[in-house]
Image (cartoon, grey):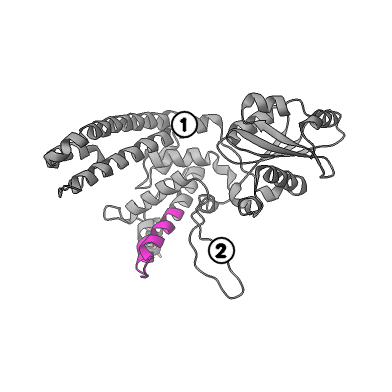
Amino acid sequence: MKKHSNLSATAQAAGRGINRFTIGIDVSDRSSCYCILDGSGQVCAEGKVRSTPEAFREQFGGMGPALIALEAGTHSRWMSALLGECGHEVLVANPRRLRLLTESDKKNDPQDARTLAELGWAKPALLAPIQHRSAAAQADLNLVRARDLLVEARTKLINGVRCLVKGTGGRITKCPSGQFTSRAHEQMPEEVRAAAAHLLEIIDELSEKIRYYDELLEHVAQTRYGYTFLLKQVSGVGTLTSLAYVLTIENPRRFARSRDVGCFLGLRPKQQDSGQRSPQLRITKAGDIYLRKMLVSSAHYILGPFGPDTDLRRWGLKLCERGGKNAKKRAVVAVARKLAVLLHHLWVTGEVYEPLRTAAAKAAA
């Protein structure tokens, strides 16, 4: 096996334009394995490099332009940007499409790096490359996700306090999260107060921080992403959902059709047709988990008792009427998918949303 000692010759050859090398990098948290193929697809160098910007620049900065394939992950954003600055063409592979790596019975870091290099050399389209969003959009999206982390922490603490109370035979009645501590002080048994006192203080602090993020995100939406008002025309879609939507997709023109957004967010059913057999399967759950969760939450509101009368609500309720064990769940997912398509259409066209447009057209006909 050829090691790092041959990398200098590889770099010199690439610099003279003799070959265009293909590099596969299996990214890990501390160190990453790489494999370099020459123009004929033969391995000419393999080794490891620390997963730091300094080490990557030293390792790959002196090479001539090469095609580099690596998997999407925590480090792929800064790695792809740094390697692009070094003059390389970088393909960030979609790990959900690389069953050859994720389900291999001979899986190790050097082998994964070689597989990535071979796929990049033979047919780059097999990597299903993705494109990272801009640094500005990522920074704003981090605010949304930071708020979500605080909400998750508060929910766990609230559930923990409820469990402590139930252990004594008591119960805290249902209420909005922002009102939980006041309700808990009123209904909490005395034998639990000492244990739960600091937990309630932390819950209050988290609620205050969440309100701060809500105000900050409202300011960000109004000053930087004013077009979110187009999405907020749909009832059930607020600032948080609309902002997460535009920041996750970033460029609406990346989709030729609005209906492609549902597939991008993993809201379409899987397909495993064979002959006359066409089973009903679950959704793919590809794409951004948080945005999919927000769309499903909006769909619950649309179909819920407080949802206003709209074409989308009527369509979803008809799906619920079909019966079956999972009719309501399927209807919620279907409404979420249709909502994703509707939001993209409003974003691209800038149209005024008409809640009962289809119903009015049928009545006129």
State the image coordinates of residue 321 (x, y, percent, origin top left). 34, 68
Span highlighted in magenta in the image: 316-337
Which label belongs to residue 344?
Answer: none
State the image coordinates of residue 295 (x, y, percent, origin top left). 41, 49
User: Given the current orientation, which residue lies at the most extreme bottom position?
Assistant: 276
Quadrant for residue 239, please give it. top left
Q: How many C-alpha atoms fall within 10 Å of the one at disc 2: few (<14), some, or many (≥20)?
A: few
Mark 1–mark 2 Cα distance, whole angstroms, equals 35 Å
Tell me the kind of residue under disc 2: Gln
**Residue 220 magenta-drawn?**
no
Q: Which residue is mark 2?
A: 271
Say which of marks 1 and 2 sits in front.
Answer: 2
Q: Which residue is mark 1?
A: 140
Q: Earlier in the sequence, mark 1 or mark 2?
A: 1
Q: In terms of secondary structure, where does tag 1 sit?
A: helix
Q: Is residue 231 visible?
A: yes
- Who's the residue at 61% across and 43% down the image? 130
State the image coordinates of residue 67 (x, y, percent, origin top left). 74, 38
**Residue 332 magenta-drawn?**
yes
Q: Is residue 154 left or right of residue 74?
A: left
User: Given the current orientation, which residue lies at the most extreme front position?
Assistant: 1
- Who's the residue at 47% across and 34% down the image? 141
- Who's the residue at 15% across and 50% down the image? 169
Q: Is residue 256 visible?
A: no
Q: In terms of secondary structure, where does tag 2 sit?
A: loop
Tell me the kind of residue under disc 1: Asp
303, 210: nearer the viewer = 210
318, 171: nearer the viewer = 171
User: Which quadrant, please, contains the N terminus?
Assistant: top right
